Image: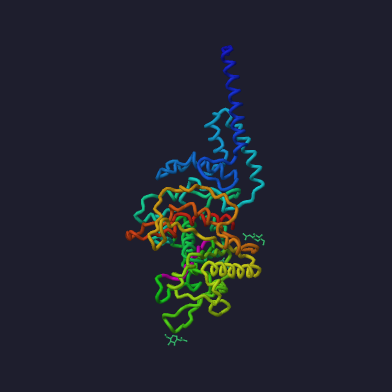
Amino acid sequence: MKLGLNGLVGKQLSLTLVIIFTTLLIWKWVRTPYEDSFHQLQDLDLFSQVAKVDYANQHPLAEEDFPNAEIAGHHTSETVVQVVSDNIVGPTTASKQTEDAKGFQSQIREDKVCNFAKGKWVAGKGRPLYSGFECKQWLSEPWACRLTQRTDFSYEKFRWEPENCDMPEFDGTNFLRRTKDKTIALVGDSLGRQQFQSLMCMVTGGKERPDVEDVGLQYGFTMGLNDKRPNGWAYWFPFTNTTILYYWSATLCDVEPLNVSDPATSYAMHLDRPTSFLKQNLHKFDVLVLNTGHHWNRGKLRANRWEMFVNGTPNTDRRLAAMGSAKDFAVHRVVEWLDSQLPHHPRLKAFFRSISPRHFFNGEWNSGGTCDNTKPLTGGNVVSQDAAIDAAAASAVNGTRVVLLDITGLSQLRDESHISKYSIKGTEGVQDCLHWCLPGIPDTWNEVLAAQL
Ligand SMILES: *[C@@H]1O[C@H](CO)[C@@H](O)[C@H](O)[C@H]1NC(C)=O
Ligand SMILES: *[C@@H]1O[C@H](CO)[C@@H](O)[C@H](O)[C@H]1NC(C)=O
Ligand SMILES: *[C@@H]1O[C@H](CO)[C@@H](O)[C@H](O)[C@H]1NC(C)=O
């Protein structure tokens, strides 16, 4: 027996110390469970607290290239509790702590509802989901940031981990199998087109697919005389008979020329009438994702010569003419109309995508605004609020069968992944802090969409 008095006292002492430290830890937690030294907490949410500790402890956010990108993977919060315990009480009590915390958290989990909009960004294995060099078949060049002079790509390496939701790892082949004989339509502005290109790259893994057929003509997608590009794209995957398409309708309103024989005609933009493309094609769709937002300003209206109409006549209501009101009104009308159509189209799953945030700092797009930050998640990695940020979209879908694809909050945290000042030809000075680099944030929108199909 080597264990003398000293050893015994030592053992008791360390046990006592462990108990004291554990008590202190629990006491501190009970007293200030939601205190956070790294970030101002927006609300009393345990998961955001845990995630923020996680963020501060585990992610080498200052580094450009994320050498530790693998560590976070798909872990849950217990890893984090362990890290905290390790720092304070040492490994002896860590596993007990972890188990207690786990039990407590799983109870909380059961009480909570899945909300894809809430959660956290984590450095993720298997990101990006496709290569920005390879996916040339579907990506518009200016949006493939790998083809520009940009040199930092750390923004590609995160995955969104929604709170209390199962979001399986996206797999293109599996997605096609699940959408056998189905047509997926995205209708909206250029951000919708980004989501469409992203989905094409995700489904193909960014690989060349000569077997995929262009079926745009079936939807009337053609180039107008003065157009630089067609008004839509549609592609058909022969093996699964899946069609994925996008139609450009920047406001989702029906737009018609006021004088068809005048090449310089103005257009009636019917705030209370959805684009005729939807009326004509709705019966063909199994999944529909609508979006609008960034064309609701005077400049765009003037440039497109759109004039607001309501009830088939020019709008004279000045309150409605205010851009925000006009947008809200139009969004409510299109969602209302779509909801009224759903009983006739029982196969159709309809989504309205919330606004994609812009990140012009120190100015606007036309007054020197920039988005030069290259360090991901400098403003935190957690969305913890329950209410949708895009209140107009949330209120439009409220009480309807149209589902809000709520991506505003999670995208808001990613100011570093816009196109920024980079371009193919090197047109320095132009800053695009509206569109996103691809691969990038719209991939996550599609993951959130796919998880709800
Ligand atoms: C392909 O899917 C459509 C429905 O989207 C269906 O009408 C058609 O019969 C399918 N074609 C084949 C060959 O299965
Ligand atoms: C429509 O445009 C044509 C060609 O510019 C013009 O001759 C005609 O007067 C216009 N019609 C109306 C009703 O303004
Ligand atoms: C949805 O409608 C309910 C009932 O009218 C209302 O209490 C709630 O505030 C609405 N929510 C949103 C996000 O508009």
Classify residue 276 as left or right of residue 365: right
Q: Position of residue 201 (x, y in %)?
A: 46, 58
Is residue 427 found left or right of 261 in the rendered image? left
Tell me what residue is drawn at x 67 percent, y 47 percent: 111
Residue 292 at least partly seen: yes
Q: What sort of colour scheme is used for the picture?
A: rainbow
Asked if residue 33 is positioned above or below residue 174 in the image, the reply reads above
From the top left corner, tell me how far across and down residue 94 is, in percent.
57, 31
Q: Quadrant of residue 63?
A: top left
Q: Is residue 449 visible?
A: no
Image point (60%, 50%), residue name: 165
Task: Say whether residue 234 is magenta.
Answer: yes
Between 415 and 34, which is closer to the camera in this rendering?
Answer: 34
Foreground pick, 317 / 47: 317
Displayed-image quarter of ligand 1: bottom right
Vertical position of residue 436 compared to residue 120: above or below: below
- Quadrant of the rendered structure where residue 134 is? bottom left
Q: Position of residue 219 (x, y in %)?
A: 51, 72
Asked if residue 88 is among those painted magenta in the image, a careful observer would answer no
Q: Nearer the viewer, residue 323 or 269?
A: 323
Q: Quadrant of the N terminus?
A: top right
In the image, the segment drawn in magenta is 229-239
**Residue found at x 32% / y 59%:** 426
Q: Which of the 4 image quadrants contains residue 437?
A: bottom left
How many circles with numbers are drawn on the protein? Answer: 0
Rendered location of residue 405, percent (x, y):
56, 59
Q: Nearer the viewer, residue 264 or 23?
A: 23
| Quadrant of image for the C terminus | bottom right
Single out the residue that lies furthest toward the front: 318
